[in-house]
C-alpha cells in the first residue's frame, strides 16, 4: 500500500478506514400490532392513537398498518385502562405515567415481564456430604419441601453411621 494513501492533504497520517463488515445486532424485541394491543387491553385503535397524540403513549414504530408497538406500550396502555376505570382525567394519568419506568408499571400491575430466577439452597447433611436443592422462582413449592424433608429423613440413618 502506498504511504501517501494514508495521509491527508496536510501530510498528516489518517486513521485506518473502518471495515465494511456489518456488526451483529441484538434480536428484535417482541413487537405488537394494533390488533394485539386491542385484544390484550380492550382499547380501540382510535383510543390508542388518541393516547399517543395526548402524550400518554410514545409513538409507534413505523406508520400505517405495519406500525408496531413494544412491551412498554402494552404496559402503559394497561395502566391507562386502570386509571380510566378509577376516573382519573387524562392530564393526571399523563403526569403519573411520565414518572414511571416500564418495570415500575409492571410491578404496580403485578405483571411479571421476566421469568422468575431459580434459587439454590445448600443443606449440609454431614461435613463431607451436602444436598443441593434448586428452588424454582415464584411461589414456594410445598411438594418440593416435603420431598426434601423426606430425603433428609431417609438419609439420616446412613449419615449417623458415617459419624460413628
Image (cartoon, grey):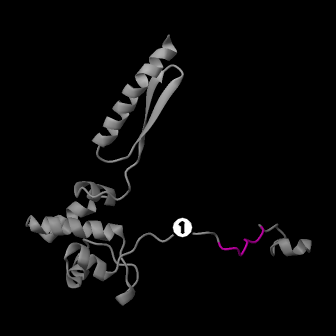
Of residues 140 and 86, the one nearer the viewer is 140
* Residue 53 in view, yes or no: no
Please state the horizontal and vertical placement of residue 10, each as a whole percent of the image. 81, 72
Q: Residue furthest right?
A: 2
Is residue 32 shown left or right of residue 49?
right
Residue 105 x, y percent position in the rendering: 27, 59
Depth order, front residue of 115/62: 115
In magenta, the rendered stretch is 16-22
At which x and y percent is residue 163?
A: 49, 13
What is the quadrant of the N terminus in the image? bottom right
Residue 119 lies, with reference to residue 2, above or below; the image says above
Q: Kindly identify which residue carries mark 1.
A: 26
Residue at the far top in the pictured view: 164
Q: Is residue 155 visible?
A: yes
Q: In this rendering, is residue 76 above or below 128?
A: below
Residue at the spot 26% in from the left edge and 67% down from the top edge: 76
Prevalent SS, magenta region: loop
Residue shown at the point (45%, 24%) measured from the top left: 124
Residue positioned most to the left = 87
Q: As drawn, is 50 to the left or to the right of 10?
A: left
Q: Residue at x 21, y 85 (%)?
A: 46
Question: How would you rate the neighbour count of disc 1 (Cα within 10 Å): few for under 14, some for 14-19, many for 20 or more?
Answer: few
Left or right: residue 43 versus residue 65 is left
| Percent coordinates x, y for residue 157 in the rendering | 42, 20
| Among the 4 quarters of the image, the one containing residue 77 | bottom left
SS at mark 1 in the image: loop
- Which picture quadrant has residue 156? top left
Amino acid at each position: 500500500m502506498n504511504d501517501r494513501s494514508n495521509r491527508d492533504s496536510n501530510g498528516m497520517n489518517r486513521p485506518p478506514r473502518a471495515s465494511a463488515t456489518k456488526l451483529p445486532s441484538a434480536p428484535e424485541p417482541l413487537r405488537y400490532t394494533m390488533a394485539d394491543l386491542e385484544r390484550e387491553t380492550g382499547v380501540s385503535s382510535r383510543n390508542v392513537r388518541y393516547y399517543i397524540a395526548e402524550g400518554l403513549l410514545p409513538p409507534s414504530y413505523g406508520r400505517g398498518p405495519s406500525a408496531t408497538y413494544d412491551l412498554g406500550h402494552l404496559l402503559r396502555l394497561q395502566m391507562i385502562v386502570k386509571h380510566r376505570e378509577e376516573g382519573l382525567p387524562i392530564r393526571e394519568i399523563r403526569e403519573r405515567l411520565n414518572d414511571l419506568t416500564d418495570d415500575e408499571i409492571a410491578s404496580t400491575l403485578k405483571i411479571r415481564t421476566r421469568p422468575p430466577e431459580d434459587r439454590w439452597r445448600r443443606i449440609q447433611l454431614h461435613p463431607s456430604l451436602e444436598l443441593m436443592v434448586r428452588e424454582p422462582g415464584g411461589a414456594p413449592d410445598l411438594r418440593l419441601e416435603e420431598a426434601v424433608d423426606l430425603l433428609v429423613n431417609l438419609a439420616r440413618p446412613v449419615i449417623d453411621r458415617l459419624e460413628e
